[in-house]
Amino acid sequence: MCPNRIRTEQEIHGRHGRPITDQDAHEINRVEELSYDLKIHEVMSKNLQTASPDISLSDVLKILRINRISGVPVIQDEKLVGVISIEDIVRALQNNDLTETVGQYMTRELVTVASFDSIVKAMQTFAEKHVGRLPVVDEEKKLVGMITKGDITRGILVALQKDYKAEEVRRYRASHLFEDIISDRTTLVLRYNIKAQDFTHGGNASSHIKRALLRLGADAQIARRCGIAVYEAETNLIIHTTHGGILKLEVEPHRITMSTTDDGPGIPDVEQVLQPGYSTATDQVREMGFGAGMGLVNIKRCVDNMELESTVGKGTKLIMRIHVPAENFNARKEG
Amino acid sequence: MNLQQIIERLNLNLLTDPRDFETIHPEGGYTSDLLSCVMAGAKSKYIWVTLQAHLNIVAVAALLDVAAIIVTEDAQPDAATITKANEQGVILLSTSMPSFEVDGKLWEIGLRN
């Protein structure tokens, strides 16, 4: 699905650029998601047929017939004052009253939806109020369009079609990477250079890794475990190294290997740093909430296998491995 | 219970862009100012209560997919933090209450995981 990217204008009004969550990846299907992401103004009809309250019902009937619609909003002095529909005209017919004005028979009890709301809001209103069409108003309560169930269906189909090309195809391709490329051993390697003391970009590499794994078709739980492990390792490079280091992710169909390497200062006692709560972080770093002495403990908890090697004056290498169940990354040889 | 109700009942300030909070249903809460503890303890869709307000809370929240961060005791995230939160889809809320009081109120209205 959609990855994080720089916030765009469309993010406010449309669905593009919406950040992915574990939930999205797993439970919500596309149409449900679209019903929240698509805004009413994106699907409503803007070609407005309106009526004035002073015209006769037989004139309205003409408008309805020519445009093949079942109702129109009634506008007076640029303001929405009611809706006149087939039902209202049927009532007038019973009284033999087609020469009467729209104002006499229109429905004045106004149910409207806001143009900036999600289409799910319109769907709820259709269900609650048992109506088939709703006037759409903007922030200033001015009529800007009409929405019907047909508009919603059409809007979702159009969005799905656009979306499919832009996003699903990309995800599909990524998730079939390992199936499409044939070799005796395929490995995808991602490298990130982490700078010492660069708290501003702390966590960026981890977010990118988590997203890459989801896009490659990894299970949300595995992506989460990798994200946490790699975040702690990334943070360690930022806090403790002299010149930063390299964070590497190697993805294979059956295994994910994450590692960090740096050139110092090195850890004098590797056993000691594995103790929960042991930390050498400065007070300044602790004030930011780092240095709880839980980083390596968290990593151990999240990965299947962790190796830490260090030489004072030379540097540290941390290797973390997670075994991947066969259903991830479409690694199976079928069809 | 949805996030809109929580925002209203606790009278929280919204720091990031408005979203459809009624569709967000937090499943629990976690309170800590130590990022590694949050990494270990906060689950997806939890509310994270903290008085940390710096940029790195966004990365932690995004990785964990928390429902929202409540920054307590009037701690003020800077503009870069709020921008990054918007980019990453992280919801930032703030209050003058201390974390203890926020937890109490969340518990009271039924968020007890």
Image: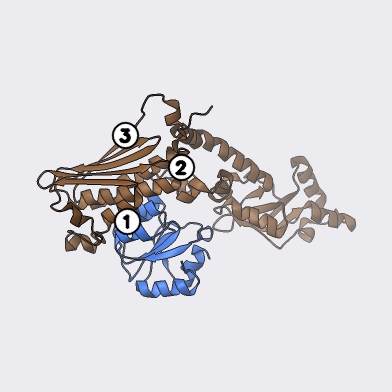
Q: Residues within 10 Å of mark 2 (few under 14, many from 20)?
A: many
Q: Nearer the viewer, residue A255 or A262?
A: A255
Residue A108 image-quadrant placement: bottom right
A114 relative to A44, above or below:
below
The residue depicted at 37 percent of the width and 38 percent of the height is A255
Task: Give the residue pinned by disc 2.
Answer: A2
Which mark is on residue B55?
none
Q: Which residue is mark 3?
A: A189
Question: In the image, what residue occupies the spot 18% across and 62% down?
Answer: A284
Provide the letter of the chain coloured brown: A
Across and down, in percent, residue B92 comes to 39, 60
Is A129 drawn above or below residue A175 in the view shown? Answer: below
What is the spatial separation of the Cα atoms under label 3 and label 2, in whole angstroms?
22 Å
**In the displayed structure image, the side of residue A123 where residue A18 appears, left or right:** left
What is the quadrant of the C terminus of chain A in the image?
A: top right
Q: Amino acid at mark 2?
A: Cys
Circles 3 and 2 in contact, beta carbons < 8 Å? no
The answer to which quarter of the image holds residue A5 is top left
Q: Which residue is mark 1?
A: B81
10 Å neighbourhood of mark 3: few (<14), some, or many (≥20)?
few
- Badge 2 marks a residue whose secondary structure is loop
Secondary structure under badge 1? Answer: helix
Question: Foreground residue, A53 or A172?
Answer: A172
The answer to whether the residues at label 1 and label 2 have Cβ atoms under 8 Å apart is: no
Chain B shade in the render? blue
Residue closer to the observer: A290 or A328: A328
